[in-house]
Image (cartoon, rainbow, N blue to C red):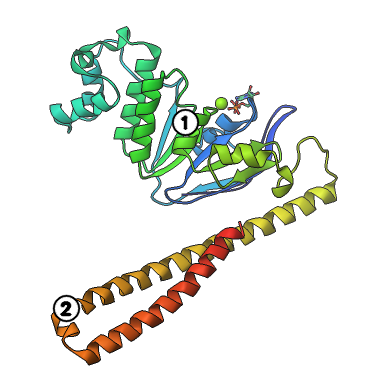
Amino acid sequence: MLIAKELSKAYGDRVLFHDVDLFIRKRERIALIGENGRGKTTLFRMILDRVKPDTGYLVLGKNVTLGYYDQEQSDLSDEKTVLDEVWDDFPELSTREARTYLGSYLFRGDEVFKTISNLSGGEKCRINLLKLMLRRSNFLLLDEPTNHLDIPSREALEDSLLDYDGTMFVISHDRYFLNKVADQIYELTEGGIVKYLGNYSYYVEKKDNPERFAGIPIEERPSKTRIVEEKKRKREKEKEEKDRKLRVKDLESKIESLEDRKSALADDLCKEEVYSDPMKTHSISQELKDLEITLQSLYEEWEESLEDN
Ligand SMILES: Nc1ncnc2c1ncn2[C@@H]1O[C@H](COP(=O)(O)OP(=O)(O)O)[C@@H](O)[C@H]1O
Ligand SMILES: [Mg+2]
């Protein structure tokens, strides 16, 4: 969906970040975290081509359609009703569909006839989020979407993001929210992105064991050679990690097809034409036995590949 290499950005003397690399695949659900002012919003704006990086480049996949949300931008019309606000953008929706969608964003009954000017900040956020989801972009960039949302609204958003099957990159500090909707954490630091392949709880746990992670400690001023070495190490680690993931994927697809074969054979054994024929039964049982042995060793290999992590 997205490849970025060695992005950097500074405003005057203030360096936001450098050496930011991204490789985002279809359906990944990634949280972007980092201290305030580090440049997370700026990085999103680079992806949207609204800010130019000082160095590096960024490419989006061929069929990517971006959907962007940040609480500041809103194109709602004060005089419209909630229902019309949605309908004018999505006239193909039936009344029932429009009301169902609005219902899932907590606009129930007469609430759909409220005018935009009478809505609270949180209610406006909900409509903007609903409209964003209805656009069906395949790559969502969400910049702190739970700000201004009360708990029920946050849960409504969580639900709709859990149903969403596109790619998601979301900036948030909300750990409960992140634990639900994201399965990888990218921390933006001055020296690049530090990846944590787990949810927010995993990140917190690993954060206490920093030696286990590649990435340049911010408190140190690395020398030029250190930087080069760190980068090399980081690249090697990334390559290893990529290879490992490929291995896991490959094993999973092998296992899946063998499991399919296994259940087909097991079904066959129950067919009359088979169980009434000792030769057929024997040969199928033999194949099943062999399959079982192969599967056993594939599962072991698969577990080992997972543990290398
Ligand atoms: N157009 C701009 N001109 C100058 N400074 C900017 C501009 N946009 C952002 N900044 C500064 O860059 C820093 C990072 O901003 P931002 O990307 O919003 O950080 P984050 O989203 O991580 O909190 C902030 O200090 C902000 O003031
Ligand atoms: Mg921001």
Q: Position of residue 268 (x, y in %)?
A: 22, 78
Residue 115: name its quadrant.
top left
Dot 2 crowding, Cα within 10 Å, few <14, some 14–19, many 20+: few
- In terms of depth relative to the viewer, which is nearer, 140 or 293? 293
Q: Residues within 10 Å of mark 1 (few under 14, many from 20)?
A: some
View quadrant of ligand 1:
top right
Q: Is residue 17 left or right of residue 274?
A: right
Precedes in sequence: disc 1 or disc 2 = 1
Q: Amino acid at mark 2?
A: Lys
The amino acid on which the numbered mark 1 sits, given as a three-letter code, is Phe
Looking at this rendering, what residue extends furthest in the top direction? 118
Q: Is residue 8 left or right of residue 148?
A: right
Pointer 1 with pointer 2, Cβ within 8 A: no
Quadrant in the picture for the C terminus: bottom right
Left or right? Give the position of 227 relative to 69: right
Residue behind label 1 places its C-beta within 8 angstroms of ligand 2? no
Residue 70 screen position, x and y as percent: 46, 26
Residue that carries the numbered disc 2 in the rendered image: 271
**Residue drawn 35% across the image and 17% down it:** 124
Report whether 166 appears left or right of 271: right
Quarter of the figure with residue 275: bottom left
Point 18% across, 89% down: residue: 277
Element marked by disc 1: helix
> According to the image, label 1 marks what residue?
177
Q: Nearer the viewer, residue 42 or 253?
A: 253
Callout 2: helix, strand or loop? loop
Q: Position of residue 125 (x, y in %)?
A: 38, 20
CA distance for labels 1 and 2: 50 Å
**Residue 56 at x, y percent in the picture:** 63, 46
Number of the label disc, if any, that sits on residue 122: none
Residue at the extreme bottom: 279
